[in-house]
Image: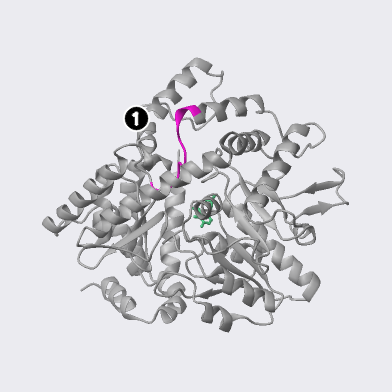
Amino acid sequence: MKLEDTLMNLVSKLNPRVVALLEKRLKKIPAFKKKIDQQSDEVMGDLESSVRPYKNRFHTFTELPQTGRARGEILREMEIMSKEEEPHWKEGFLSGAVYHGDQEHIDFLNQVYALNSQSNPLHADVWKSTTKFEAEIVAMTADMLGGAGTDVCGTLSSGGTEGIMLAMKTYRDWARDTKRITKPEMIVPVTAHAAFDKASQYFKIKMVHVPIDENYRADVNAVKKAITRNTVVIVGSAPSFPHGAIDPIAEMSELARAKNIGFHVDACLGGFVLPWAEKLGYPIPKFDFRLPGVTSISADTHKYGYAAKGTSVILYRNPELRHYQYYTTTEWPGGLYFSPTFAGSRPGALSAACWAALTSIGVDGYMSATKKILETAEKIKQGIREIPELRVLGDPLFVVAFDSGALNIYKVLDTMSRKKWSLNGLHKPTCVHLCVTLRHTQEGVAERFLADLREAVEHVKAHPEEKGSMAPVYGMAATIPMRGLVSDILKKYLDVIFKA
Ligand SMILES: Cc1ncc(COP(=O)(O)O)c(C=O)c1O
């Protein structure tokens, strides 16, 4: 066995903490580095061809054309690409991603976008219509999430990640100002979205992860134990991205309230589903501003709000808290400057399209969409439970995660990919999920999914020797004990994405 293989073998047997300590040194050993580079280059080579299918069919621009191209030619090329990509999402092969997608709805939003394409809410004095739209989107969302008749307020953001990051920054600054906390900590279930980790890194808030219980919900006792004098915020998901589980928000937010700690509900996925599910009679635990301990909620209009991509709502219990989100400067030679979120200029047309989506759909529209989605999810859960090799994780509503005791679930994922399905591969624990959207409520889609899944399971059983394409990547990410190394591989993947 070669030295680098021996080292790799050794590393895989070590305690992860020891590995983290050793990692930097190991990467300096040329033979070891070469081995790792070789392995990741192999994987990247395969990925590069899959993310650049147009390479040999259309001109690649690495510099501006000297004379502008004809608009018609540009549109024709885009139409070809769009036509090729459209069936994949339109026919319901994606998990999440496109939440509505009916042509009439898309055409309407496009019309609204075209009417407002020049709008920039940074100039509130010019685009007064956009300011109206944004204020009303916030008000309607607050009303839907238990904020009617209270001081609940908020802003628009560009998506769930931005909303979450804004909230975490807000709690850091609030706690520094009102409680003199200079070493802030956030308590976050391991299943909460990666955006919380991003916020922890960006804003230097110590991440205190808490485990989940056997139902994939945050462990309330662990939350209780994790609270310190430096805790600025506790987080719960309604529901979580990986397993679609709703954390025990009532209990967790009470712990926060008793100690005057902020409590953020990540309802990016569920914000525009759970209120309607409750009205439809599903047993939905309270998760919103009706709970006194809840101090902020993020809810994505660009998911189940059925707006175009690029909008989300971040709500706060009161305007005092919201003030810690805002940015103002009085000393800049460019004049007095203030903005509610991270961006400066913003696409007002997206806010207009969001307002148009909310008001054109209305309560009845959301209720009927939610009913269809939940009934389809039920059919899918039932179908998966009938496949003996598979197991649904927890008791989810519309994000259905499943694993297998008998088979490598990543190979099932790979086989499903060959049948056009884009499901999400998850780890810790190893599983796969389908986030059910309106696309899956079209006639025959759930049945096609289940038939393909049954076939995929049979295929993997019959061909244990097949390696698959993504299975090794997921496998590698799950087994490499050096997290820094996995990060390096992900960065290389991003390099590939931005390579013309
Ligand atoms: C629960 C949850 N929170 C946050 C996010 C982040 O949202 P976005 O991708 O819009 O930034 C997601 C995205 O899927 C999510 O499912």
Residue at 59% over, 33% down:
360
**In this view of the protein, which residue sits in the foreground, 62 or 136?**
136
User: Who's the residue at 59% across and 62% down the image?
Assistant: 265
Q: Is any part of residue 207 visible from this angle?
A: no
Image: 178 above or below 162: below
Q: Which residue is mark 1?
A: 56
Instruction: Say above or below: 372 vs 69.
Output: below
Does 483 appear in magenta?
no
User: What main secondary structure does the magenta stretch of the protein show?
Assistant: loop
Percent across and percent down for residue 275 are 55, 53
The amino acid at mark 1 is Asn
Q: Is the residue at mark 1 in contact range of ligand 1, meaning its CB lies under 8 Å from it?
A: no
**Range shown magenta:** 95-104
**Mark 1: which secondary structure?**
loop
Which residue corresponds to the image point at 53% horizontal and 74% vertical from the top-left? Answer: 209
Quadrant containing the N terminus in the rendered view: bottom left
320 left or right of 331 in image: left
The C terminus: image quadrant: top left
Residue 200 x, y percent position in the rendering: 60, 66
The answer to which quarter of the image holds residue 259 is bottom right
